[in-house]
């Protein structure tokens, strides 16, 4: 019931591609993540995923096209749709997604974060 | 899968206290709303509700205390908790809540919006 300041929470995040949980509601989580360079192409079997850009320009690669998402914009990636987040320089994102969502979806690799920490 | 620009959508909203749907995922909706003055004290039986401030200062009255939420901050009101949004001057909010959420919760009055439009 207390407010959350997005910049304060972002200041606690040091590593790229490591989402941290900053809120929970209705079985969903609000996460913050800093990204740079390329992630893994993946999809989520059962989860739709919202990416809101707080800073920078996210490039979402759908395989057949790339969408640029700027500050003040968001993108919803439906379940089952392959996507690869990319960022030429540092990007700060807010994510809305079910608590069950694994960051690398159907892929397990060195970027997988099994238990995102709560900050 | 296409991006949504929050300011573009806000420019389509003319009336206060009339939330409009700008995204849907996992049974949840993303809404935008412009507010000013006072809403009705109410609660939601089964829905937690997230209020993110895009512009201005939201004052959330919980009855026994008031929390000021500024641009770049958000608040999660758990189900069952009475709350009354207030704004001394115009405030722009992004809401994240289940698709079943009625804006006035357990109260039905002239502020109730049964079917928020999609924009």
Image (cartoon, coloured by chain):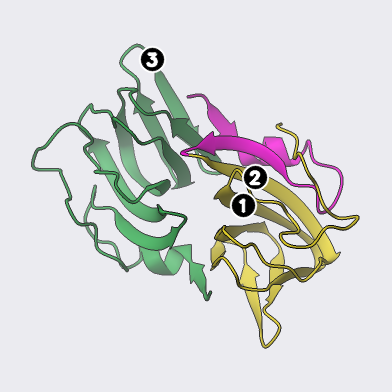
Chain colours: A green, B yellow
Q: Are marks 1 and 3 in contact (CB under 8 Å)?
A: no
Residue A15: x %, y % from top left: 21, 56
Identify which residue is drawn at 71% across, 59% down.
B105
Identify which residue is drawn at 28% across, 53% down.
A19
Residue A94: x %, y % from top left: 43, 50
Q: In the image, B111: left or right of B56?
A: right
Q: Secondary structure at mark 1?
A: strand
Q: Are marks 2 and 1 in contact (CB under 8 Å)?
A: yes
Q: State the residue position of label 2.
A: B31
Q: Secondary structure at mark 3?
A: loop
Q: State the residue position of label 3.
A: A65
Q: Nearer the viewer, residue B118 or B13?
A: B118
Q: Are marks 2 and 3 on the same chain?
A: no
Furthest-right residue in this view:
B110
Q: CA distance from mark 2 to mark 3?
A: 27 Å
Mark 1 vs mark 3: give the one in front: 1
Q: In the image, B52: left or right of A7?
A: right
Q: CA distance from mark 1 to mark 3?
A: 29 Å
Identify which residue is drawn at 15% across, 44% down.
A112
Q: Which residues are magenta?
A: B1-26
Residue A70: x %, y % from top left: 50, 37
Task: Give the answer, above or below, for where B41 lies relative to A26.
Answer: below
Q: Secondary structure at mark 2?
A: strand
Name the disc covering residue B95, or none: 1
Identify which residue is drawn at 78% across, 36% down.
B12
Tell which subunit mark 2 falls on: B
Tell which subunit mark 1 falls on: B
């Amino acid at each position: 019931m207390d407010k959350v300041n997005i910049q304060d929470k972002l200041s606690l995040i040091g590593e790229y591609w490591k989402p941290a949980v900053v809120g929970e509601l209705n079985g969903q989580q609000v996460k913050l993540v800093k990204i740079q360079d390329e992630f893994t192409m993946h999809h989520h079997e059962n989860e739709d995923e919202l990416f809101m850009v707080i800073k920078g320009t996210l490039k979402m690669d759908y395989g057949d096209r790339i969408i640029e998402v700027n500050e003040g914009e968001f993108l919803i990636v439906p379940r089952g749709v392959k996507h690869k987040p990319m960022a030429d320089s540092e990007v700060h994102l807010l994510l809305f997604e079910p608590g069950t969502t694994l960051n690398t979806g159907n892929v397990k690799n060195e970027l997988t974060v099994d238990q995102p920490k709560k900050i």
